[in-house]
Structures are given as C-alpha cells and as structure tokens.
Image (cartoon, rainbow, N blue to C red):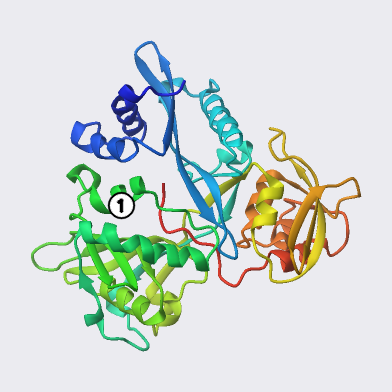
Amino acid sequence: MRVPEDRLTDYGRAVNRHFYESEADDDVRPWVEAFRSGYRAWWICDRARVVANLGVIETDVSLPGGARLPLAGITAVGVAQTMRRRGLLRALMQAALDEARTRGEPLAALFASESAIYGRFGFGPAVPHVAYRTDRSRLRFRDPVDVRLVEETTAEAAATTWPAIHERLRGQRGGSVGVTDGLWRMTVLEDPPGWRDGATARRLVEVPGRGYARYRVKEGGDWVASDGTVVLGELVATDPEAEAALWQHVCDIDLTTRTTTWLRPPDDALPHLVTDPFALRAFEGPPMYVRVLDVPRLLTTRAYATRGSATVEVIDPAGYAGGRWHLDVGTDGASCDPATRSPDLVLPVDALATVAFGGVRATTLLAARRLEERRPGAAAALDRLLAVDLAPWTTTEF
C-alpha cells in the first residue's frame, strides 16, 4: 500500500488524474521531486491501474502561544470515479492515521475539496478562513502608505529570505502549518505552465525583511477594456506598514479590475484598511480541518491566558483520542490527565479539534448541538480557557 520510491512519478500522475489536472511529465515531475523527502505516499492498485491515493507531508503546526507540535499534513487524496463506495479512502486514511499515531504525530490536518467527507474520520474545521473579491474601481485605502516600499524579487531570493518572515508569523498565531522545503519549492521555486490555469507566471514581491506576497494575473476583457484578475496566493507581513503596502500593491495592478484571495484570517486587517468595506466581497474561505490523535499532548502544549479547569469526555469511535480528560491550567502551565469524575462537557473528537485552536467557540458548538453541556456554564468556561489574542491562520494550502 505504501508507494515504492521508484514509483513516485506514477503516483504523482495518478494524483493529477484524480484531480482532473495535467498528467504531463513537466507538470508532474516538479512536485514529485519536491516531496522525495519528508513525504509519505500510499496507493491502492487494481491490476496495473492506480485507483486510490493519499499522501502525508511531515511538518508541524503552531499552537496558541507559539509552541509547535508535529503534524501529519494529509494531501493528494483521490479515488477513481469507477472505484468509489468500496472503502478505499477509509483504508488509506486509517493507514495514514495509524502511522501518524505510531510516529508520535499528535495531530493530522487537511484541506477538503469535498468538505462533507472528513467529519466521519474525526476531522473538524479548526482554522477558519475568509476569502475576498475586491472591486478595484471602488477600493480606496483609508491611510495609504508609500507603495515604493514594495520591491520585486526572484524565486531564488524569496526561497532564501521569506521562510524567516513566515516563522515570525507562526510565533504570533496558532494553526500555522510549517512550510517545508518541499512546500517552498511548490509555492515559490517551481512554476510550470500547466500549473497556471491560464494566468501569468507567479509574481513575487516583498517589503524586504518585513513581508511578501505571491500572485498571478489572469487576463480578461478585450483590447477596448481590460478586465484582468489578480489571483493572490499569499500575503504575509510582520508589521502594519508593510502589510498596508503589500495590500495596496496587489489591489492596484494595471490592466486588472479585481483581486481574489481565499485564505485570510477572520480578524484580517484588510476590511479596516479601506474606506468602503463593501468594495470587498467577503465570503467563507476553506478551513483547515484538524484531527486530534493525542488529547493530553495538544492541551498541555498550547498556552493559556487564564487559569481554570475542565473535565471533558471525548467520543472517538476510531479509538485514537477517546476518553475522559481533566484539564487543569495553573500559573506553571497545564496538565491533562485521565479522569473518572463526571464530565463538564461531552463532545465528539471533531468538535474538540474545532475549538482547540481558539478559532471557534465552544458556546457556538453548544448552540449547534455539536457538544453536550453536563454542567451549566461549562462551554463558556472552556471558551475563556481557550481564548486567543489572534485568530488561528495558516497561509498555505497543502
């Protein structure tokens, strides 16, 4: 079921086929080469044909307070249309989660193309995102900065200097996935034409040492009226001035009428940078789904802003994280131990993942009947324990 090293190209071609993407060597080879290390691949074959596939990127994720935990980044999940409803995805997912638990990875995460699928495997939407579609004709910045701060850069230079900027972001926000060498190659260094969906080659700009953005421009309109779109892949800044400069740049590209982006934090500064928030069409972006495999390790590694305690019963039919746990947060840190006392809250493992990073409130899940409150006020008390200063955010899909 694990993919042999000498068959990774065949695996990559199957992944692209199941996502309806190019199977040409020039489009498959770059990402296969990027993930020859720090990547685990599974497949199921029917005779000589690959009918299902799944991969895991070996990385880590930041927690509230800046600490990191190893993360199994599940990606490249696909099943042939003619082989659906046969348990192939379940077999691959169980193999990946079993190995993650064996390797001491307390968390797994993924981005879902079909969001209804993964709750049954214990994944909950833990890191919510906002997407924007800006209207350039209406967009005015309230307190503009000097856009000459923004400079073009090369892929080679970006791969050298941008990781340090990204790491500073991860120290400020939970839920941020570590960008491995393979992911940097995929998002900065590699850019075959087959990846561009009719847009330009990737543009890379930065405020040196303080922030960066990567985007493409997709042509539209005709020779009379240009109607291009800036497709923003990532924008990261470590201070307000650099962030404003980068936003001004990507929202005012010649020959375009809009900028689209889909992976922004719920507390993004952008709506407050502009005079007319309705020039930003905001809608829900793709959340990162998290699967908890080790409850005590997660809850004792993250930071807390206040003291308190809670006893929670986690329901996990797969058996990875189920049980009753008592969380106690004091001045010297947190402990999380098996408990026999009556629980304050009972919740499925996907709901625990949803609230653990502080991006979704337990009281919201209580109202949605996604958890059961056994002690009145327990959900609100858990919210106070799990509260964060900045919303969780990860900048890169995988």
Identify which amino acid the numbered label 1 is placed on: Thr
101 or 42, which lies in front?
A: 101
Residue 376 percent location from the top left of the image: 87, 62
Image check: 356 left or right of 398?
right
Residue 156 percent location from the top left of the image: 21, 56
Q: Residue furthest left?
A: 223
Image check: 375 left or right of 50?
right
Residue 88 percent location from the top left of the image: 51, 23
Mark 1: few, some, or many residues within 10 Å (few <14, many ≥20)?
some
Q: Is residue 51 above or below residue 162?
A: above
Residue shown at 34% from the left, 74% from the top: 210
Image check: 22 left or right of 266?
left
Image check: 385 left or right of 301?
right
Residue shown at 31% from the left, 41% from the top: 34
Residue shown at 32% from the left, 63% from the top: 162
Residue shown at 61% from the left, 41% from the top: 119
Q: Is residue 86 above or below residue 192?
A: above
Residue 217 can be seen in this image: no
Q: Quadrant of residue 274?
A: bottom left
259 or 192, which lies in front?
A: 192
Q: Residue furthest front?
A: 332
Residue 272 percent location from the top left of the image: 45, 81
Q: Residue furthest bottom?
A: 143
Q: Which residue is mark 1?
A: 187
Residue 224 can be seen in this image: yes
